[in-house]
Image (cartoon, grey):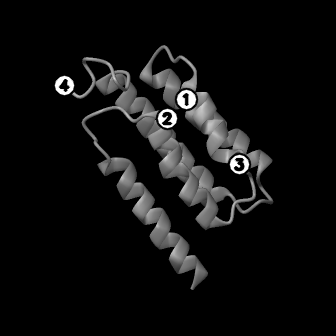
Amino acid sequence: MHALQMAVVLAASVLLWGCAGAERPLTLKEYYGFCWPSQIDSGCWDDRLCEDYRDYLAQEHVSKQECIKGCNELQTLKFSADAVHNCNAAIENATDGCESYCRRLFDYGQPGSPTAGE
C-alpha cells in the first residue's frame, strides 16, 4: 500500500509541475513548495535534497540548455550520494522540477519581470 500511495503522490507532483501557471516562470519558493512534499512522502533521508536544487537554480544561468544540463549533473551527483537513502523517486521529481524551472525561466523571463507571462 505504501508504494501505491507514493506513486499517487509522485503522479500528482508531476501534474503540478506542468499545471502551476505554465505560462509564466516559477519562483524559487514555488519550486521548493513542489519539491519538498515529494521528498518527505518518498521517505528520502537527504535533508538537503530540495535545498541543493533550489540553491543551484538561484545561480545565474547563461542558457536554457546549460541550466538543464546542470539539473541533470546534480541528479547524477545525488543518485551517487543518496544510493542508500531511498531517494530515487524524490531525486527524479526534483530533477523534473529543476528542468521545468529552467525551461520556464528562459521561455517566459525572470519571475516578477515586466515581460514574464506575456
Reading the image, the residue beneath label 4 is 118
- Under mark 2, the amino acid is Leu
What quarter of the picture does the C terminus occupy? top left
Q: Label 2: state its secondary structure.
A: helix
Residue 23 placement: quadrant:
top left
Q: Residues under labels 4 and 2: Cα distance?
A: 20 Å
Of badges 3 and 1, nearer the viewer stands 1
- Under mark 1, the amino acid is Leu
Q: Residues under labels 3 and 1: Cα distance?
A: 18 Å
Reading the image, the residue beneath label 3 is 79
The tag earlier along the polypeptide, 2 or 3, is 2
Of badges 3 and 4, nearer the viewer stands 4
- Depicted 80 relative to depicted 105: above or below: below
Reading the image, the residue beneath label 2 is 28
Q: Label 4: state its secondary structure.
A: loop
Q: Do the residues under discs 2 and 1 have CB atoms within 8 angstroms?
A: yes
